[in-house]
Image (cartoon, helix red, strand yellow):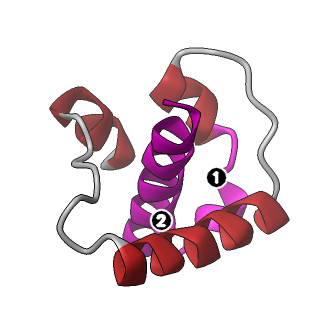
Amino acid sequence: KGERRLIDWCTIMNDFATKRANWENNLNAFETIFGETVVITKDTVLAAQRAFEIACRIFPESLPQIPPDVAGKLEL
């Protein structure tokens, strides 16, 4: 369950960084997305993207889908 949660976060952070050219200036948006106080740095996002790439190679058929409510917030 913990590994799945980690992959979920990595998927969301990867999508966030992919969709926002200026994501480094919008890290506070994660608080809006998750509805809780979080501390996320550039290094956190870059590490999450690397982890997501690894998950894509190892588990290409079982990657999580971003929930629609979270996906909508990523577009803000």
| Residue 6 falls left or right of residue 74 | right
The secondary structure type at the circle numbered 1 is: loop
Identify the amino acid type marked 1.
Asn
| Residue 21 falls left or right of residue 69 | right
Give percent across and percent down for residue 23.
59, 64
Identify the amino acid type marked 2.
Asn
Q: Are marks 1 and 2 in contact (CB under 8 Å)?
A: no
The secondary structure type at the circle numbered 2 is: helix
| Residue 63 falls left or right of residue 22 | left
Residue in the image at 70% along x and 72% along y: 46
Residue in the image at 61% along x and 78% along y: 50
Circle 2 Cα neighbour tier, 10 Å, few/some/many (<14 / 14–19 / ≥20): many
28 or 53, which lies in front? 53
Q: Main secondary structure of the magenta part?
A: helix
Residue in the image at 34% along x and 36% along y: 73
Give percent across and percent down for residue 2.
57, 33
Residue in the image at 39% along x and 62% along y: 15
Give percent across and percent down for residue 56.
37, 76
Instruction: Give yes or no for residue 14 being in the magenta stretch.
Output: yes
Identify the mark nearer the N-term, 1 or 2.
2
Residue 14 got which mark? Answer: 2
24 or 8, which lies in front? 8
Eye-nearest disc, 1 or 2: 2
| Residue named by callout 1 | 26
